[in-house]
Amino acid sequence: MNLMKRMFQGLAAIALTAAPPAVATAAQCGNDAAGFEAWVHQFKGEAAASGISRSTLDLAFANVGYNRATIRADRGQKSFKLTLDQFMQKRGGQTIINRGRSLRKQHASILARIESQYGVPAGPLVAIWGMETGFGGFMGKEHTLSAVATLAYDCRRSPYFTEQLYAALNLLESGTLSPDAIGAAHGEIGQTQFLPVNVLRYGVDGDGDGRIDLVRSKADALASTANFLRGHGWSAGGGYQPGEINFAAIQGWNAASVYQQAIAIIGAAIDGD
């Protein structure tokens, strides 16, 4: 077992031992900024009791604040109400296909190595890469820990994002996440936008440099995405259009049906060139 596998098995174990306390003792959620500071104080106490070090908590929350941009984004996800054609047009589907074909050829050796290891062909990986961040062109502008903490505090999905916050703290403690990390509005990280829990579960060192960097390393981001899809049931050699064996793995990537269909359509067009 190599060093990176041992490290991430250790991270997974930390995540389990540092799981959020029972709901009955959870910090009180809120629906506006008024109670956020009190929530942070209570959450830090609970996290320390669960095994997160005080030094990690102090580092993590030194610059954390209630993020109104994150709340606006969480309340305003309108794209998924579009038809597939509208969604493809809004996301620039043909532009992603055209550039994706070029990038598939440019990174052919990396993508071939990933397919050999994980069974996932270039098309859906490049499609996800293009749809999530424009091939790494824009990975977000929000302070990651503030975004995740805000959503953990917010009552709408507090348990889900509390788990994400614990994962982010574990990533910070291991040195995988910087306390100043910048990402998307819901705390997504890197070129294909992994939430912290998924970095812990599926993040891999795709370029062999001994660390996982989903922001700067295309190979890490694409290999981790392939590992995510394999972890959601991807079967090597199988189709990935709706009704085919691997479409369920794509459904695991995003809950919106138009997004799932767009990945399949764009991926097939990239693979087919």
Image: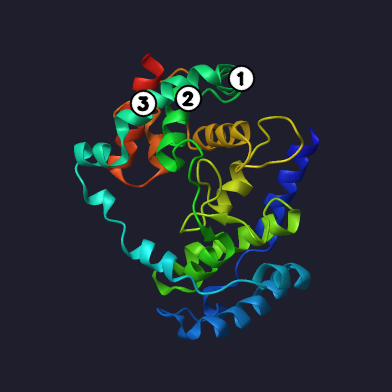
- In the image, which is nearer the foreground, mark 3 or mark 1? 3
Identify whether 65 is placed above or below 266.
below
CB atoms of marks 3 and 1 within 8 Å = no
SS class of the residue under badge 3? helix
Q: Residue at x 43, y 35 (%)?
A: 130
Cα–Cα gap, marks 2 and 1: 16 Å
Q: How many marks?
A: 3
Cα–Cα gap, marks 3 and 2: 24 Å
Question: In which quadrant will I find the N terminus?
Answer: top right
> Which label number is shown at residue 5?
none
Provide the residue designation for mark 2: 235
Q: Is residue 72 left or right of residue 205?
A: left
Q: Give the mark nearest the N terminus, 3 or 1.
A: 3
SS class of the residue under badge 2? loop
**Residue 85 sits in quarter:** top left
Q: Is residue 172 left or right of residue 255?
A: right
Q: Is residue 32 left or right of residue 167?
A: left
Q: Give the mark nearest the N terminus, 3 or 2.
A: 3
Provide the residue designation for mark 3: 97
CB atoms of marks 2 and 1 within 8 Å = no
> Which label number is shown at residue 113?
1
SS class of the residue under badge 1? helix
Res 239 seen here = no
* Mark 1 crowd level (few <14, some 14–19, many ≥20, 10 Å Cα): some
Q: Give the mark nearest the N terminus, 2 or 1.
A: 1
- Amino acid type, label 2: Ser
Q: Residue at x 53, y 47 (%)?
A: 194
Q: Residue at x 60, y 68 (%)?
A: 20
Q: Is residue 12 left or right of residue 255?
A: right
Cα–Cα gap, marks 3 and 1: 21 Å
Res 127 seen here = yes
Q: Residue at x 61, y 31 (%)?
A: 219
